[in-house]
Image (cartoon, rainbow, N blue to C red):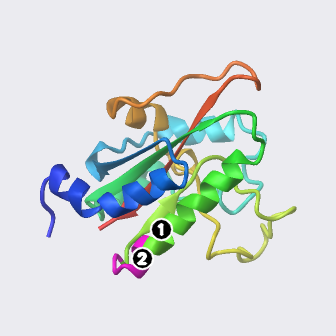
């Protein structure tokens, strides 16, 4: 039964604590109504990302912003996870692995709807099985932005840091979202 966000924060504290214990900088329980979707986000993937259509976890194979809003509305809460990236080129891969591990822990604790949205494109396979089923459906997850989530607005509304990165040497902020009910 849904309560207010502070009740949810207490209920999901073991998972935010687990995330922090595993190196996540911030883990906040938020209401899914405070996760923002927008059509322009998907357009930026299509007309700005060289990986567009290259994996099953990227558009056009992911939910549209409208479909994502419907999915978000079928949940009450999510755990927004933040990691500062600093010069470890495998950091995104490690971050996404950690998100799926947290999702699995939450699922095994009885939250059967637990589902994760990661950060950036999937790079599990050297070449994605784009013409067939995903070879790693148990671990592969689409990114927040690939599903039309306005990550900048969502995290800024929570008081978390994010900015446009101007070169490869700058620190980056990665975000993921574990949906939980």
The residue under the point 54% across, 23% down is: 163
Q: Secondary structure at mark 2?
A: helix
Foreground residue, 83 or 175?
83
Q: Please determine whether, in this image, residue 103 is positioned above or below residue 67.
A: below
Direction from residue 151 to residue 43 in the image, left or right: right
Q: Is residue 127 above or below residue 54?
A: below
Magenta stretch bounds: 106-111
**Quarter where residue 58 is shown:** bottom right
Q: Residue at x 76, y 46 (%)?
A: 51
Task: List x then y, in percent, for residue 76.
Answer: 25, 59
Q: Quadrant of residue 109?
A: bottom left
Q: Quadrant of the N terminus?
A: bottom left
The image position of residue 140, as x and y in percent, is 64, 66
Picture disc at residue 133: none
Task: Give the quarter of the figure containing the C terminus.
Answer: bottom left
Please give the residue where the numbered disc 1 appears in the rendered image: 103
Q: Is residue 37 above or below residue 122?
A: above
Q: Is residue 153 magenta?
A: no
Kindly identify the residue that appears in the image at 35 percent across and 57 percent down: 72
Q: Are marks 1 and 2 in contact (CB under 8 Å)?
A: yes
Image side of residue 40 versus residue 5, left or right: right
């Amino acid at each position: 039964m849904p309560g207010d966000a502070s009740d949810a924060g207490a209920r999901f504290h073991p998972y935010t604590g687990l995330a922090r214990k595993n190196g996540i900088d911030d883990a906040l329980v938020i209401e899914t109504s405070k996760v923002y979707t927008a059509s322009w986000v998907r357009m930026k993937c299509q007309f700005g990302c060289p990986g567009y259509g290259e994996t099953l976890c990227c558009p056009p194979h992911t939910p549209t912003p409208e479909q994502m809003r419907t999915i978000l509305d079928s949940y009450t809460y999510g755990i927004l996870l933040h990691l500062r990236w600093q010069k470890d080129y495998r950091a995104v891969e490690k971050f996404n692995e950690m998100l799926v591990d947290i999702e699995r822990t939450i699922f095994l604790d009885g939250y059967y709807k637990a589902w994760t949205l990661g950060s950036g494109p999937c790079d599990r396979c050297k070449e994605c099985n784009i013409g067939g089923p995903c070879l790693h459906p148990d671990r592969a997850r689409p990114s927040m932005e690939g599903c039309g989530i306005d990550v900048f607005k969502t995290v800024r509304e929570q008081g978390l840091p994010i900015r446009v990165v101007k070169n490869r040497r700058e620190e980056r902020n990665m975000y993921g979202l574990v949906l939980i009910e």
